[in-house]
Image (cartoon, rainbow, N blue to C red):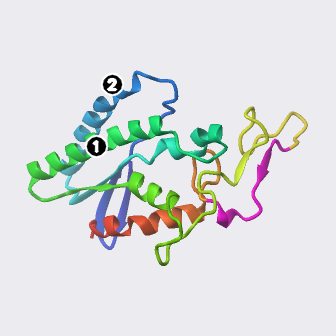
């Protein structure tokens, strides 16, 4: 959990962590338990006096380079994305219920899924938006499937490659956006973030 003081208002952020779901058929049955625990945690935070509470939706995990590598970084893994969508649907329902129970709309979802997809699918049509040539391809990746960004062998030789222009890449490595990537996500999130103030 991250707590920040923005414009004199305490804002509490409750995030979730998406574990690797590849090949794990039982994960879908686990999602309601995760959302139920998030709901308990959000209620606790509200009872502590937080006036606005932001909870992040999961990003499209099937669009992370670790999942798009098998398609040469050309398409998202829809099976993984459907799991993230399922989590986000249950989360939206839980947050709507919490807002009805508290009568003060204290809970806001920061929709990382929609913002990531907006950036990934951007064809340069939105004025002022950042367009990435191939948003699914990371700037830094291993020279083979045995290596990741930053790996070196026993003699210290690099086992990864870097793109020439890191500002042209949405993802830095298999899971993390670049600074430019986060700027694009932030721009897509601005309307949601304004609800916090």
Residue 18 is at least partly visible in this image: no
Q: Secondary structure at mark 1?
A: helix
* Quarter containing the C terminus: bottom left
Residue 79 is at least partly visible in this image: yes
Give me the disc on residue 189: none
Q: Position of residue 165 (x, y in %)?
A: 73, 65
At a point 26% along the width and 40% down the height, the residue shown is: 90
Task: Tell me the quarter of the picture where residue 145 sits.
Answer: top right
Dot 1, crowdedness within 10 Å: few (<14), some or many (≥20)? Answer: some
Which residue position is annotated with label 1?
89
Q: Position of residue 21 (x, y in %)?
A: 48, 30
Left or right of 147? Residue 170 is: left
Does 31 appear in magenta?
no
At a point 35% along the width and 53% down the height, the residue shown is: 13
- Alpha carbon separation for disc pair 1 and 2: 14 Å
Does 163 appear in magenta?
yes
Left or right of 129? Residue 103 is: left
Q: Nearer the viewer, residue 154 or 90?
A: 90
Q: Position of residue 52 (x, y in %)?
A: 24, 60
At a point 51% along the width and 39% down the height, the residue shown is: 77
Q: Is residue 25 above or below residue 99?
A: above
Q: Secondary structure at mark 2?
A: helix
Which residue position is annotated with label 2?
29
> Residue extending furthest top?
26
Q: Nearer the viewer, residue 136 or 178?
A: 136
At a point 14% along the width and 46% down the height, the residue shown is: 97
> Residue extending furthest bottom?
127
Magenta-drawn segment: 158-169
């Amino acid at each position: 959990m991250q707590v920040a003081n923005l414009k004199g208002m305490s804002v509490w952020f409750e995030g979730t962590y998406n574990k690797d779901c590849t090949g794990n058929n039982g994960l879908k049955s686990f999602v309601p338990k995760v959302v139920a625990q998030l709901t308990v945690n959000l209620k606790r935070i509200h009872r502590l006096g937080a006036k606005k509470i932001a909870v992040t939706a999961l990003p499209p995990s099937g669009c992370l380079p670790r999942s798009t590598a098998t398609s040469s970084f050309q398409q998202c893994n829809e099976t993984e994305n459907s799991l993230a969508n399922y989590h986000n649907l249950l989360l939206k329902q839980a947050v709507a219920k919490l807002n009805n129970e508290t009568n003060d709309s204290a809970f806001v979802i920061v929709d990382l899924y929609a913002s990531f997809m907006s950036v990934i699918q951007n064809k340069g049509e939105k004025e002022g938006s950042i367009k990435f040539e191939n948003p699914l391809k990371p700037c830094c990746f291993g020279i083979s499937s045995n290596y990741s960004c930053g790996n070196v062998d026993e003699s210290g030789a690099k086992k990864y490659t870097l793109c020439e222009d890191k500002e042209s890449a949405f993802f830095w490595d298999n899971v993390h956006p670049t600074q430019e990537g986060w700027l694009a996500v932030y721009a897509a999130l601005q309307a949601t973030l304004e609800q916090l103030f």
